[in-house]
Image (cartoon, rainbow, N blue to C red):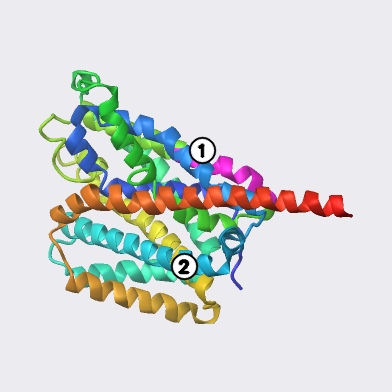
Amino acid sequence: MEKKYISKWQFFTLIYAYILSHELTRGAYIYYYRHSSWIPILLAVPLSCLLFFIYSFIYKNSGSTDFKTAIEKVLGKFFAKIFFGIYFFYFLFIIILKLRDVGELVQIYIMQESSFLMIYGFYLFAAVYCAIKGIEVIARYSGIVFFITFTSFILFYILLFLVNEPDYGNLLPFMPDGFLHYVNPALKMAYSVPLGELFGMLVIFQHVRPEQKKKDFKTAYIGIASMGAMMLLISLTNIIFLEPEVLILGYTPIIRLWRRIDVEDFIQRLDIIVINILIMNLIIKTSVLLIATKAMADGIKETKKNKFLFYSVIAVTFIILLMVFVPDYTELINLRYKVFIPYVKSVFEVFIPILIVIISFLRKKNVKAEEKQLEYNI
């Protein structure tokens, strides 16, 4: 029988893996902001924590620990179904984008001769298997991946500084275009790549053990801040170890960084290990989003008895869509940063959640007024 609850530590590791998976496409920001790319990340960390703090009022104001019940209490059952419907497709779309990222990553760096069909098939098999097993199994897996990721990064950073000489002059000039130039990318980073897309994690919050829920929002903030610190470190080391002209190459900063660890025939291609670590974290994010997607479907109509069929149909649909519509990856990245992030994600990650929170405050105020009136009548 599936265990329903996870600990706050497991929730932390899920957030850690969820955010780390964004490292695949974060290089686009470095392309535009070069040696100043670390500044918007620094600004985005408190903004991302603030946004998740705002999300938390959906649970707090509704007085419910179940996501479906919380949304229904705030919006009513009719509008709640509409909400679940649009977020069902939103989460699916994010998963499709991540699948495209994985396919490109694996085919470029590891299996150049492999077809996208095989890559998508194996990756989805792992993600769907995790989703079927349930959030508690995924959380235990994320704990193992967190340990592997953290220890590997410490080891690699030690090697990086031993075999390379940093050039701190690459960090200058400081804010050449002024502070306001970095506000817009900081906002985008807070609700999207690399520190955003966290509304899906709010759905997973319902699985945290009831006795730990009050403290677990703090755990989420610590998770966001920890990953923000890691991405800040990765950005700074990219700048001080890579030549300015190299910064604009590729979309995954951490991979090109680890390729600098090269000791003749003794230590080479550590980037292969990093790619596998990223894929393990990506499986966690994809399985979490699959569970969030099913929660949206359950909000419309319960599908508990058809879990295997539900995930299988989604997986097959993903593969068909990705094999039929395969746009140029560079064009896809540009489309995501110029259209999807500012005009789509801002709606689903910022405006709709804030609107729901505002409604929840109004509902809470009305309930209190009704209770006072009832007491007065008694």
For this view, does 39 lie left or right of residue 355?
A: left
The N terminus - image quarter: bottom right
Q: Kindly tell me whether residue 10 is visible in this rendering.
A: no
For this view, does 72 lie left or right of residue 255?
A: right
Residue 209: image quadrant is bottom right
Dot 1 lies on which element?
helix
* Pointer 2 local density, CA inside 10 Å: few below 14, some 14–19, many at least 20: some
Main secondary-structure element of the magenta-colored stretch: helix
- Residue on which disc 1 sits: 222
Residue 267: image quadrant is top left
Q: Residue furthest left?
A: 245
The x, y position of residue 252, in whole percent, is: 23, 45
Is 70 rendered above or below residue 170? Answer: below
Residue at point 20%, 18% (across, down): 173
Is 378 rendered above or below residue 76? Answer: above
For this view, does 60 lie left or right of residue 140?
A: right
Figure label count: 2
Q: Residue furthest front?
A: 377
Residue at point 35%, 47% (across, down): 192
Q: Earlier in the sequence, mark 1 or mark 2?
A: 2
* Residue 229: in magenta span: no
- Residue on which disc 2 sits: 82
Indicate which disc residue 199 carries.
none
**Over which residues does the magenta segment extend?**
211-224
For this view, does 237 lie left or right of residue 289?
A: left
Q: Is there CB contact under 8 Å for labels 1 and 2?
A: no
Q: Nearer the viewer, mark 1 or mark 2?
A: 2
Q: Amino acid at mark 1?
A: Ile
* Residue 222: in magenta span: yes
